[in-house]
Amino acid sequence: MSFTVERGDALMLTGANGSGKTTLLRCLATALKPDHGRATWEGVDLWTDRAACRPKLSLYSHASALWEDLSGPENLRIWAQLGGYAPNIEARLDEVGLELRHEPVRTYSAGMRRRLALARSLLKEPELLLLDEPFAALDPDGRALVVDIANKRRASGTTLIIATHLPDEAAAVCDKRIHLEAGRAVAVP
Amino acid sequence: MIARIIKQTFQVAYKDLLIEWRSPQRVSGLFFFALVLVILVAFTADASPGVLKKTAGGALWLGLLLASARSLDLSYAIETDNDALSGMVRWPVHPAAMFYGKALANTAVLTLVGMALTPMVVVMYNAPVQGSWLQLAAVLVLGGAALAAPGTFYALLTTRARASSVLLPLLLFPLVVPALVAASRATALLMDGDAMGEAGSWLSLLLAFDLLHWSLDGLFFGLIVEER
């Protein structure tokens, strides 16, 4: 598979379970070392120069990277401090439609966790935002919110790659699509 | 760069300690686990008061050693629940900061459990501390650090293994034998008055063990955290 995404583009990855969407996103997010091939971001190899690339990338996936015993604001504050990013906790929570709650994350519903995880992935102000099944576990309002956030980010120059089983929702953001089958790009069915 | 690593180290340690503070049942569970072991040893030894007193240092460190395996396992459970560890690698948090932050927090937890356990041991084993309390505190801190550094390293290695709670003691316990011997001997000597001033040499051995592991484990942590 070979593809290029321009700055500010939004690419949709579709395919059945096990087709390789998440693996591809994890390789791009430098969470997995590719067995073969290479991926570059603005000419820089993502894996070999991952230290330089990581601050520019953000992956939002079902693995929320949240600490269950801490509250949502505490999670965001600590992640912001660790990365040296401006916390803007209230603004971040407002952006994803969450209220300022001081209960631990383990008391949150699945949808609230997803929203909080999205807020966390936006802390970095990433140049490349990788969204793995961003509509999963969200109600219709939540899905509309993700579309809205993605469109706003795209308008401000963020590049988006969205892996999804819900192409209709993602189509409101993306103008390019790659369909995967067994790790290979095929024509959209 | 170094200033950033130091800052991240304290942020990771703060985060781990905040989580411990928010779930005090974890530390109290460790304390009671170690306490039960200390009580069991005291009652099963069925020794004369003099002999019991001599085993006090060993019993304290046996309790702490077994509690440390659980403590270290838990310190990674909070990271693997939602894959926060992988998130930190990609954030990016420097691997050295992740290691030293977690090792510092683990040292603090083990030292706290050791400090709470010591008065119990003193009472149950009729072993009042006749040496320097300051030196005993140093033994607890350095001994906790001696368990925490290799423990933080090996707990990461075993965190994804199917039987991590079994594998960790298998890897860790043989490695920390020199530190345990030094900590037990120093504790026993301080409880016995340390008439010959030998505790200092055991403390030096403990310090050397700490220096070795806090430097080497920190160096190699980056390799394994990336390849998990």
Image (cartoon, coloured by chain):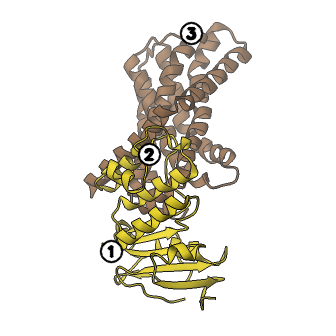
Circle 2 packing at 10 Å, graded few (<14), some (14-19), many (20+), is: many
Of tags 3 and 1, the one toward the viewer is 1
Query: Quarter-wise, where is residue B33 in the image?
Result: top right
The label on residue B123 is 3
**Circle 3 sits in a helix, a strand or a loop, which is it?**
helix
Q: CA distance from mark 2 to mark 3?
A: 44 Å
Chain letter of disc 1 in the image: A
Q: Quadrant of the C terminus of chain A?
A: bottom right
Q: Chain A, which colour?
A: yellow
Provide the residue designation for mark 2.
Answer: A72
Provide the residue designation for mark 1.
Answer: A155
Do the residues bearing badges 2 and 3 touch, measured as CB atoms within 8 Å? Answer: no
User: Which amino acid lies under the numbered mark 3 shown in the image of this protein?
Assistant: Val
Q: Is residue A147 left or right of residue B27?
A: left
Circle 1 packing at 10 Å, graded few (<14), some (14-19), many (20+), is: few
Residue in the image at 47% along x and 80% along y? A11
